[in-house]
Amino acid sequence: MKLILGPLFAVIMMSTMALAQSLSLGGGSAFGTNRPVENPIAPTGLPAVVIPDPMSGIVPASAISGTSSDDISDLLRGGDTLIIRLTGVPTADQGIFEVKIDEAGKISMPHIGSLAAANNTTVTLKKLIESTFIKEEIFTNPNVTVDLKEQRFVDVTGEVRSPMRVPYTKDLTAMGAVAACGGFTDFANRRKVRLTQNGVTQEFNAKEIQSDQGRDIRLRPNDKIHVDRSIF
């Protein structure tokens, strides 16, 4: 019996040692060992791609297009009253000037005289005044600021719950102005709402806009909206 068990035990021990050596050299296991897997090295020289989190509410700047700092609604026009401050010049010439853009679109400034102001923004008009002072060799380093004196409005009248002058903002739309007045009355003719822009009156269908907000109309300063009473 001892002669038989001795060789058999030796064979089992040799098989066990061979299996252990195979595993230590990287051999696989039928059950899969939980060995850590290193991340591959990313290639260098390539820009990182940032994928925005859709739940974060943050819109990357690269996704914003079609924006412009100079909007037509920012342009100055005849009838606007401006507050112009002049500094960076001799004390006797410094001051705050209240000027009104006339029907020809011009203003009058000390030492310069008549200057085109309409169809400029407050920023471009500031630069124009400063450059004119320098070009005419009146002042060497003038500092000018230009501000609108008065708030601009959109007038909403007729069949709205609270007709009023709605303060103008860049994102104001026709339906937004009506909403600011409390909405339409029960007697409003929503199919034919009148909008006057730059002296030209046209009609729009508010019902269609309410069902498709992409058709809403962007307003401009001094626009007028009138809602007639429905005949039904």
Image: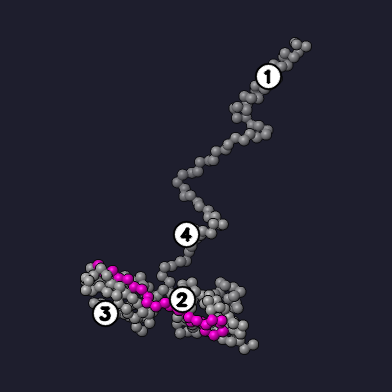
Q: Are marks 2 and 4 in contact (CB under 8 Å)?
A: no
Residue beneath disc 4:
61
Kind of residue indicated by mark 4: Ala
Residue beneath disc 3:
113
Q: What stretch is highlighted in magenta?
A: 141-165
Instruction: Based on the picture, tell me whether residue 153 belongs to the magenta stretch.
Output: yes
Q: Distance between the residues labelled 4 and 1?
A: 68 Å
Q: What element carries label 4?
A: helix
Residue found 53% across the figure and 59% down from its top: 57
Depth check, mark 2 against mark 4: the one in front is 2
- Report the label total: 4
Residue beneath disc 1:
13
Residue, far front? 162
Q: Residues within 10 Å of mark 1 (few under 14, many from 20)?
A: few
Q: Earlier in the sequence, mark 2 or mark 4?
A: 4
Kind of residue indicated by mark 3: Gly
Residue beneath disc 2:
168
Residue 189 position (above or below residue 65): below
Q: Is mark 2 on a helix, strand or loop?
A: loop
Position in image of residue 119 (x %, y %): 38, 76
Q: Distance between the residues labelled 3 and 1?
A: 110 Å
